[in-house]
Amino acid sequence: MTKLKSTKLPLAASLIVASALFTVGCSNDNQVKAVDRTEEAAALARVKALEAQAKALEEGMPEANSSFAPVGDSAAASASIKMPDESTIPDNELGDSIRRGLHLVNNTYTELPDHVGNRLNCTSCHLGNGSEAYAAPWNGLTGIFPIYRSRDARVNSLQERINGCFQRSMNGKPLDPTSDDMNAMIAYMGWLSQGIPVGVSPEGRGFVKVNNELEPNPENGKQLFAEKCALCHGDNGQGQYTEDGGYIYPAVAGADSFNDGAGMARTYKAAAFIKGKMPFGQGNTLSDQEAVDIASYFTQLDRPVKANKDKDWPKGGAPKDVRR
Ligand code: HEC
Ligand code: HEC
């Protein structure tokens, strides 16, 4: 308890902590000896949570999204990107939906053939169940969306953002935003977002940075692709498949790949993904220039064409690698 007094807290926060101490410590004197150890531990945990909350306030951070956080968990749990333990998925209807979402993102083209026009899964790009840092993870997104996006110059819900990937990355059709399957994906992303404060974009969101001033050299990229990528993704980037049609390695070009309106079809966006994550298991081994060269080659290989790309970025500001 003396430790608390020495903690530097802003006045308001100290008051919160002090009042908590008061509630905890106000049992009358002759009962003190009878204080139950577990109760004491719970009270201490509560004070710790308040301390953390006070610290968060001090740093100007919004309160944690507590919908999945166990009581007493630090409100300012560090915004880390990881796959939570699957055993923490609740054993009820919401849990069933979360599990359905997890299944859908890993088996998208077999489960949702009416909505997917290629042979990719969400997790072909959003690696590790969509919970891997720098592979555009979904942790925290339920506390970040809706956001304004310049591609369509309006505020997008998380459902609309997901449908953007259905229409471009999956070369398919949007899901009904009120459908059970869409809700399952949202429920899964909500579960992934546990412990991440609302409004906080966690470190590792999106991809690593690459220098987009570099001049791409697709000829060099072609050679590097043959050396470093073709072994898994195929000489023409067509992917490799099992007899039942499942992929061993996903297509990065051709009919089974993303269309030319996808983020991954843009040179610098794709370069940022492969710089951080490819060759698989050897992330961050390519230089920025190599990543840009390779990306400028394979993104321009034949692939499905997205209609109406000219309507993207209606208010201008399109990045220079956007396809028209
Ligand atoms: C071909 C690769 C690819 C596939 C497949 C794919 N996506 Fe994406 N997705 C991306 C890229 C690229 C981005 C943009 C990342 C960035 O700019 O930081 C993105 C962004 C997102 C975002 C927003 C992330 C953020 O931080 O704001 C969500 C949500 C998302 N995708 C969901 C999905 C879902 C669900 C599926 C499956 C239906 C899917 N994606 C399939 C490549 C893909
Ligand atoms: C050892 C095998 C291997 C090598 C080598 C490799 N990849 Fe991949 N790649 C994968 C796997 C595995 C995935 C993710 C599939 C999954 O988890 O479902 C992937 C995913 C991708 C994706 C996103 C999904 C898609 O199909 O569009 C791209 C793009 C990609 N790799 C590009 C590259 C490039 C470029 C190189 C060379 C620099 C490369 N890869 C080297 C195995 C490999």
Image (cartoon, rainbow, N blue to C red):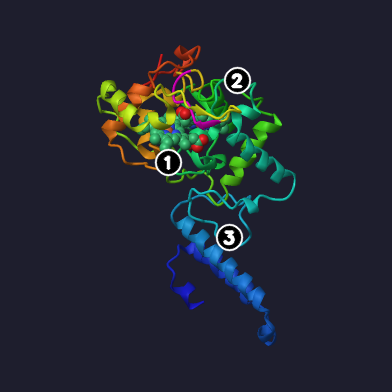
Q: Nearer the viewer, mark 3 or mark 1?
A: 1
| Residue picked out by circle 2 | 173
Residue toward you, 106 or 161: 106
Residue toward you, 91 or 316: 91
Badge 3 element: loop
Badge 1: how crowded within 10 Å, few (<14), some, or many (20+)? many
Is residue 50 visible from the viewing direction of this image?
Answer: yes
Badge 2 element: loop
| Residue picked out by circle 1 | 134
Identify residue type, mark 2.
Lys
Q: Give the residues drawn in magenta, as a range.
A: 247-254
The residue under the point 39% across, 22% down is 299
Badge 3: how crowded within 10 Å, few (<14), some, or many (20+)? some
Residue that protrudes farthest toward the right in the picture:
93
Residue 268 in picture, x, y percent from top left: 35, 28
Q: CA distance from mark 2 to mark 3?
A: 40 Å
